Image: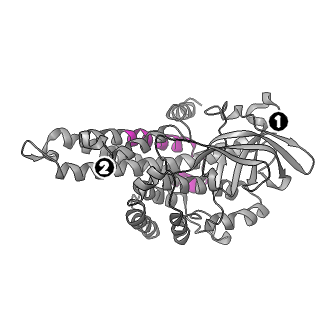
Amino acid sequence: MDFELDEELVMVRDMARDFAEKELVPRATKHDRQEKIDPEVFGMLSELGLWGLTVPEEYGGAGMSNLALAVVLEELNRGCASTGVTVSVHNSLLGAPIKRFGNDEQKQRFLPELATGETIGAYCLTEAGAGSDAAALRTSAEDKGDHFLVNGEKLFVTNADFAGLFLVYVRTGKPEDKDKGISALLIPGDAEGLKVATKEKKCGIRGSATSSVELTNVVVPKENLLSGLNQGFKVAMDTLDGGRIGIAAQAVGIGRACLEASVKYSNEREQFGRAIGRFQAIQWKLADMSTRLDASRMLVHRAAWTRDRGEVCTPEAAKAKLMASITSNFCADECMQIHGGAGYTDDFHVERLFRDARITEIYEGATDIQRLIIARDLLA
């Protein structure tokens, strides 16, 4: 058993860390306040090859592992969670399912533009009546011979505002078929009848674009069907395994930012004649934060390693997501407490970290759903 990252992973980690420190940390509060990511950041991500980190080299990507993606996402999210989730969704929820389930023609058509960031991807699963119960989705795709006619509305779509390709889950069977009547369609962002509608006003990760998507009589060619008719739920669940690893890595990154801010403040802030870091009450908080983050990171790396081996990683991904998201919120809460009243103001970035951390227990499967997945695996 080796806990050390190999030379290639250390290089990509250091590259992402340097980029995050120089370009994302100074912009993070700005991204939050203006509720969008600076356009030049997208170009930088392209230059670094981070849009296509896990896309095979033959399609213009870096051809790296899920573990590499997890390592990079921790660094990006430590700098700016809005940028981090944008990259995570693009890689985990768009590039990955096309790579895993797409046919040769689909890979050749879509992956090169995704790898360079010329096209940004978005994932459309959630609906008003289909959140944790994803099999209850109602967006329909009517078979018209050589194409599908899609109608419905999707909610909480990350990257929707600028996405050039949407992976949309639709009902191609009867409602009573539930998960057995769902298909996955690749729909270009400029498709007639596809409209990016309401942009959400969010508590945290406000720099990321999150909007609803309306689909009205959208014509989708049969060749854009991913995996096969009524095979969409399988695609969705497998894809979410990878997505949960990405969000778990995000949670570790946010938690790490909280710990680093807390250590710095504990060494600088003085009360009763000495730095507050000299008090045992503060030391225990820091120790608990650090220990939980280390445990979370190990779970994330194990889940990514398992996925890289081609094995089912559902319970491993759920455990990583569960532990890391709870830890992220724990660290954010302790960080706020250590900073006291100063942390509650926007003079420090602590309040942003506090808000950003909260979503990690909700999206890509809420904490409660992760516990169900883990328990069902144990009881199977």
Determine whether, in the image, residue 109 is placed left or right of residue 256.
right
Q: Would you say residue 309 is visible in this rendering?
A: no
Q: Compute the Cα span from label 1 to label 2.
A: 52 Å
Task: Write down the region rendered in magenta.
Answer: 305-329
Q: For residue 315, what is the image quadrant?
A: top right
Q: Give how far across and how far down residue 111 sits, in percent.
A: 68, 64
Kindly give the residue lying farthest to the left in the view shown: 273
Look at label 2 and name its amino acid: Phe
Residue 323 located within the stretch drawn in magenta = yes
Determine whether, in the image, residue 272 is placed left or right of residue 95.
left
* In the foreground, 233 or 303: 233
Residue 209 located within the stretch drawn in magenta = no
Q: Circle 1 sits on which residue?
A: 173
* In the foreground, 295 or 326: 326
When the figure is inspected, residue 89 is found, relative to residue 51, above or below; the finding is above
When the figure is inspected, residue 308 is found, relative to residue 353, above or below; the finding is below
* In the foreground, 341 or 139: 341
The mark nearer the N terminus, 1 or 2, is: 1
Which quarter of the image is occupied by the C terminus? top right
Q: Secondary structure at mark 1?
A: loop
Determine whether, in the image, residue 238 is placed left or right of residue 23.
right
Q: Which mark is residue 348?
A: 2
Look at label 1 and name its amino acid: Gly
Chief SS of the magenta region = helix
Q: Residue at x 67, y 69 (%)?
A: 59
